[in-house]
């Protein structure tokens, strides 16, 4: 999807939240805001929002001098989610519909997103995940289950640190030998990288690759050849999170987008209410 | 007060709302947004927010080619408020504390502000004004009444069209011969100009001047000599609305700020909750 005019005030809001998270120095906040305003004035609105996200967080890294400003947040949420893992693994195991329960949890875990929403804390995450067990799924659960059964080669695109523990719960109910799990190629916001996949035990469960890019989404043109090859080979892509939806919604491939709808722009684009648990097959998927 | 970092996403939000109010042409929206982003990148944060407001609405007028994009909104709200005038005039007359009741109504009328909040409609305005009759006033009502009694020369700075009908209700309970009412010098947002003061009958009630400026507030450096003289001569200034508060809060003069607190930044600055009906004497007022 394109970048909408409504995304622009939100970029500035995210910039301010992110700058404040990284440092208390108001001089740095101001430098970051001015640089983002300059960048935004000339941005290409034909590109998806993660293209601007990549630039914003690049500016934050450059101005703050920190290569990975969300490092401690990522660590905290990986550990927090690993702490919840036994409880929710038992819920999945005890469920009469384990795949659906695992899917709900994986989608709900998508709340751990410091891009759209910097107002999160462990209590809110825990509540959201519990709520998801009874909230209606918006989309085609049966289609998803069928496509998973018939696929030979599944590429699962992860989103955020912490959240990937809930992806692991879902992956444990998918055919492990067919799965490749992909993370970002470099730190951006609290998006998961190889270190996070390792920290939560995904690397010892399935093949894990990185996409070679530092965008908070999947901008195909910027991804590595290895990643592009894995994408082309996959007969099913499971794309987690809003950033992956925003950047892949127009890509002609068999993709299931699974995420928690977190803003009005994406809600309008996908045709669901904010807060929905989306399980949507790409409308551009080959017949 | 200075411009805060939190004002910046809000400027962009206001820009987008205003551009959409003025035209449906998305190409114009984009032009306006890009121009505002460029302007904001180099803005002087030491100036109060109305300095940026002036620039934003200047851009909107220039790009849209409309000298007064809010003309019909101003007319609508003048007429709407004039329609309510008899009802509320009777409420003031029937009140055991008419000055207080008129003051509440004047402050509540400040809800008709298309700058901070573009989500207003006549129903919401009517509800807000009725609510104000029982809502606690935040500030010093007795001090205000005393200062009005002892003043020889009162300058009343108006804010928005429509709202000035409620200012009229208050002014009718002040010593008319001592009052000068001031409006903006040129159209900006839905702020009242001379035409509005005339339309609601203020010009036949008291002396009315304009301030010579098109800022949505009172930037003294940009005001006319006539206005500056009137300001200097006044031993009491009644400044209506957030824009006047933002631009005059550091000015060393005997000023009462009366307005509905409409954003978190101003709320924090003045030390009141958003939604409060503020009656605050300038902390910089001479002893």
Image (cartoon, coloured by chain):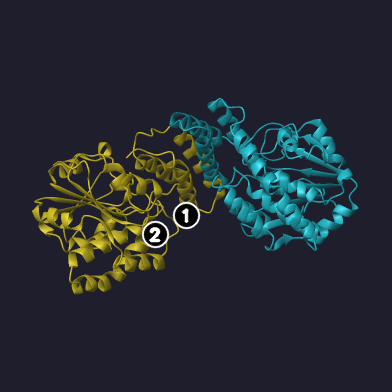
Chain colours: A cyan, B yellow
Q: What mark, if any, has residue A199 been given in the picture?
A: none
Q: Which chain is mark 2 on?
A: B
> Quadrant of residue B283 in the image?
top left
Disc 1 or 2, which lies upstream in sequence?
A: 1
Residues packed near mark 2 inside 10 Å, few (<14), some (14 to 19) or many (20 plus): some
Between A88 and A155, the one lying in front of the other is A88
Residue A66 in the image: above or below residue A286: above
Quarter of the image that includes the C terminus of chain B: top left
Q: Kindly tell me whether residue A287 is visible in this rendering.
A: no
Place of residue A93 in the rendered image (x, y in percent of width and height, measured from the top left): 79, 57
SS class, disc 1:
helix
Place of residue A281 in the rendered image (x, y in percent of width and height, measured from the top left): 78, 54
Place of residue A167 in the rendered image (x, y in percent of width and height, measured from the top left): 74, 47
Q: Kindly tell me whether residue B113 is visible in this rendering.
A: yes
Q: CA distance from mark 1 to mark 2?
A: 10 Å
> Quadrant of residue A18 in the image?
top right
Residues packed near mark 1 inside 10 Å, few (<14), some (14 to 19) or many (20 plus): some
Q: What mark, if any, has residue B73 been given in the picture?
A: 2
Q: Is there a contact, CB below 8 Å, between mark 1 and mark 2?
A: yes
Place of residue A103 in the rendered image (x, y in percent of width and height, measured from the top left): 75, 55
**In this rendering, position of residue B28 left or right of residue A218:** left
Q: Which chain is mark 1 on?
A: B
Residue at 54% x, 51% y: name it. Answer: B25
Residue at 44% x, 42% y: name it. Answer: B6
Q: What mark, if any, has residue B21 been given in the picture?
A: 1
SS class, disc 2:
helix
Residue at 82% x, 59% y: name it. Answer: A143
Discs 1 and 2 lie in a common subunit: yes
Quarter of the image that includes the N terminus of chain B: top left
**In this rendering, position of residue B262 left or right of residue B159:** right
């Amino acid at each position: 999807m394109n970048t909408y005019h409504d995304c622009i005030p939100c970029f500035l809001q995210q910039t301010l939240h992110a700058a404040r998270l990284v440092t208390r120095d108001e001089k740095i906040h101001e430098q970051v805001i001015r640089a983002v305003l300059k960048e935004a004035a000339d941005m290409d609105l034909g590109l998806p929002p993660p293209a601007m996200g990549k630039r914003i967080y690049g500016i934050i890294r450059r101005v703050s001098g920190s290569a990975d400003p969300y490092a401690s947040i990522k660590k905290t949420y990986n550990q927090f989610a690993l702490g919840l893992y036994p409880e929710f693994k038992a819920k999945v195991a005890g469920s009469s519909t384990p795949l659906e329960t695992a899917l709900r949890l994986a989608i709900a875990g998508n709340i751990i997103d410091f891009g759209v929403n910097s107002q999160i804390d462990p209590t809110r995450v825990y509540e959201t995940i519990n709520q998801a067990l009874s909230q209606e799924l918006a989309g085609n659960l049966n289609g998803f289950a069928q496509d998973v059964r018939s696929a030979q080669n599944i590429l699962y695109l992860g989103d955020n640190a912490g959240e990937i523990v809930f992806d692991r719960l879902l992956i444990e109910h998918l055919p492990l030998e067919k799965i490749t799990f992909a993370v970002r190629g470099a730190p951006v916001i609290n998006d998961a990288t190889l270190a996070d996949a390792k920290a939560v035990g995904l690397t010892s469960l399935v093949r894990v690759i990185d996409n070679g890019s530092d965008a908070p989404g999947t901008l195909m043109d910027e991804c590595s050849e290895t990643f592009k090859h894995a994408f082309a080979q996959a007969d099913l892509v499971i794309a987690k999170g809003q950033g992956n939806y925003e950047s892949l919604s127009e890509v002609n491939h068999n993709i299931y987008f699974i995420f928690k709808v977190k803003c009005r722009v994406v809600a309008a684009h996908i045709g669901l209410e904010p807060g929905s648990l989306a399980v949507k097959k790409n409308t551009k998927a080959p017949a």
